[in-house]
Amino acid sequence: MIDKDLTIIDPDLLPFWFLEKLEVLGIRTVEINQQDDEWVVSCLAVRPGRVIMPHGLFDKIRSVLNKLGVEVIEIAYDKVQLNGGGIHCSTCPLIRDSVN
């Protein structure tokens, strides 16, 4: 999740029923494409609309995120990913107040 009603997904890795559920819940999706680094979906939302992602975003997805008002902080993470897992997988739970 990037915001309370926005998520980034790789639609090729998700079952159709899950994509339908996102739509029913009113959650907008940003789909990565084959040009994007597959690890961008394992980003870390540090607050609604602000995410940390590994380098590897292509202009198309960066443009979509910018138009949606999402602030993207890109960091070099390729060496850490060699062990498996992305930024989100490498962090402890972040507990914060509700974003109602």
Image (tube, rainbow, N blue to C red):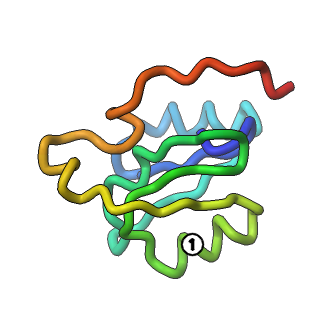
Residue furthest to the right in view is: 100
Q: Residue 29 in the image: state x and y as whole percent.
A: 62, 51
Quadrant for the C terminus, please.
top right
The residue depicted at 49 percent of the width and 49 percent of the height is 9
Q: Which residue is mark 1?
A: 62
Q: Residue 97 in the image: state x and y as whole percent.
A: 76, 19
- Going by the image, does 32 lie left or right of 3? left
The residue depicted at 41 percent of the width and 55 percent of the height is 40
Q: Residue 13 in the image: state x and y as whole percent.
A: 34, 45
User: Which of the pair 46/21 is nearer the observer?
Assistant: 46
Q: Residue 56 in the image: state x and y as whole percent.
A: 37, 69
- Amino acid type of the residue tagged 1 in the rendering: Arg
Q: Quadrant of residue 3?
A: top right
- The residue tagged with tag 1: helix, strand or loop? helix
Quadrant for the N terminus, please.
top right
- Going by the image, does 22 lie left or right of 89? right
Question: How many other residues sit within 10 Å of disc 1, few (<14), some (14-19) or many (≥20)?
Answer: some
- Going by the image, does 54 lie left or right of 47? left
User: Which of the pair 55/33 is nearer the observer?
Assistant: 55
The residue depicted at 66 percent of the width and 50 percent of the height is 50
The image shows residue 27, relative to residue 56, as above or below, that is above
The image shows residue 19, relative to residue 99, as above or below, that is below
Residue furthest to the left in view is: 83
